[in-house]
């Protein structure tokens, strides 16, 4: 008599496992959320899951993304209540979830960031010796570790949040500048719309970010360009007073009215852009 095979016991996902897959979802291009992706295979091994299970969990998070819902993406309706709760938490306080997710990643995988981040950082310039007063405060502008345990903890948390934001924004834009299409990682920046110093809860929110090349990131940061309600570039009149040459004309003045290329998820938040127009941009 042939004995019936025992049905494998279903093992619930822990919060830490859910967090690291959420981080992977945010920092991975949508087309690579499959079980053949080396990053997904490596994470599956680290957390004791199959690559198919990790890919499916990542797609469950995709099913909660309004951008994919609007596109009518089907076949990803298995999101659990816990998945939905995590998505809601992220919407309410992205900074807290990002810091927790990065910490969980470090504990479960023994690494910081993931393959995409490491590949980009090899091309990045050496961090300056002192922190720079920039609104985006990217991972390549490392903060100096101060003395004292509380200050060190705050700096570590800031670095985790920076890393999460950087990965999520650049992955959403396909590692291309949203204005020029430039695809050289070392020249791209995950720019904050509402600056880092202005809103703690939105520091890690990819909807508060745009992938820009170094020049247009600086212009956006300094209020020399912004985007209107139709996501078209608005150029400050301050740029008219500068000495105008061919490069200036092509790279700055002629981009007025150009539409921002939309990311595959986490589209720029209109309220954040409205804040930038009112508080940062110089007409």
Image (cartoon, rainbow, N blue to C red):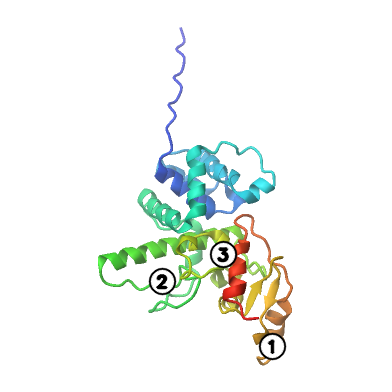
Residue 268: give x, y in percent of width and height: 61, 62
The earlier-in-sequence mark between 3 and 2 is: 2
Is residue 35 in view from this perspective? Answer: no
At x 38%, y 79%, the residue is 130
> CA–CA distance between discs 1 and 3?
27 Å
The answer to the question of whether label 2 and label 1 lie on touching residues, with beta carbons closer than 8 A, is no
- Which residue is pictured at 50% across the width and 38% down the height? 81
Using residue 89 as the reference point, say whether residue 231 is left or right of it. Answer: right
The residue indicated by pointer 1 is 240
Residue placed at 30% from the left, 68% from the top?
A: 151
Circle count: 3
Q: Residues within 10 Å of mark 2 (few under 14, many from 20)?
A: some
Mark closer to the observer (2, 1): 1
Residue 142's tag is 2
Mark 3 residue element: strand
Label located before the other in sequence (1 or 3)? 3
């Amino acid at each position: 008599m042939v004995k019936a095979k025992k049905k494998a016991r279903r093992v619930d996902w822990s919060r830490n496992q859910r967090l690291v897959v959420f981080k992977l979802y945010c920092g991975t291009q949508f087309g690579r959320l499959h079980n053949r992706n080396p990053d997904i295979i490596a994470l599956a091994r680290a957390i004791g899951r199959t690559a198919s299970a990790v890919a499916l969990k990542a797609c469950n998070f995709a099913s909660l993304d309004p951008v994919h819902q609007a596109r009518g993406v089907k076949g990803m309706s298995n999101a659990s209540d816990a998945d939905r709760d995590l998505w809601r938490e992220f919407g309410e306080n992205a900074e807290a979830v990002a810091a927790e997710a990065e910490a969980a990643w470090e504990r479960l995988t023994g690494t910081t960031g993931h393959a995409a981040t490491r590949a980009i950082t090899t091309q990045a310039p050496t961090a300056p010796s002192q922190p720079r007063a920039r609104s985006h405060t990217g991972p390549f502008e490392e903060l100096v570790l101060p003395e004292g345990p509380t200050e060190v903890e705050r700096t570590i948390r800031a670095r985790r949040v920076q890393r999460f934001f950087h990965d999520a924004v650049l992955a959403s834009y396909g590692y291309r500048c949203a204005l020029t299409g430039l695809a050289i990682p070392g020249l791209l920046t995950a720019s904050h719309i509402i600056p880092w110093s202005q809103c703690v809860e939105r520091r890690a929110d990819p909807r508060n970010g745009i992938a820009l090349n170094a020049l247009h990131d600086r212009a956006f940061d300094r209020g020399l360009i912004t985007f209107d309600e139709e996501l078209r570039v608005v150029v400050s009149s301050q740029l008219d007073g500068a000495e105008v040459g061919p490069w200036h004309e092509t790279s700055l003045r002629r981009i007025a009215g150009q539409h921002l290329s939309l990311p595959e998820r986490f589209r720029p938040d209109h309220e954040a852009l409205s804040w930038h127009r009112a508080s940062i941009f110089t007409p």
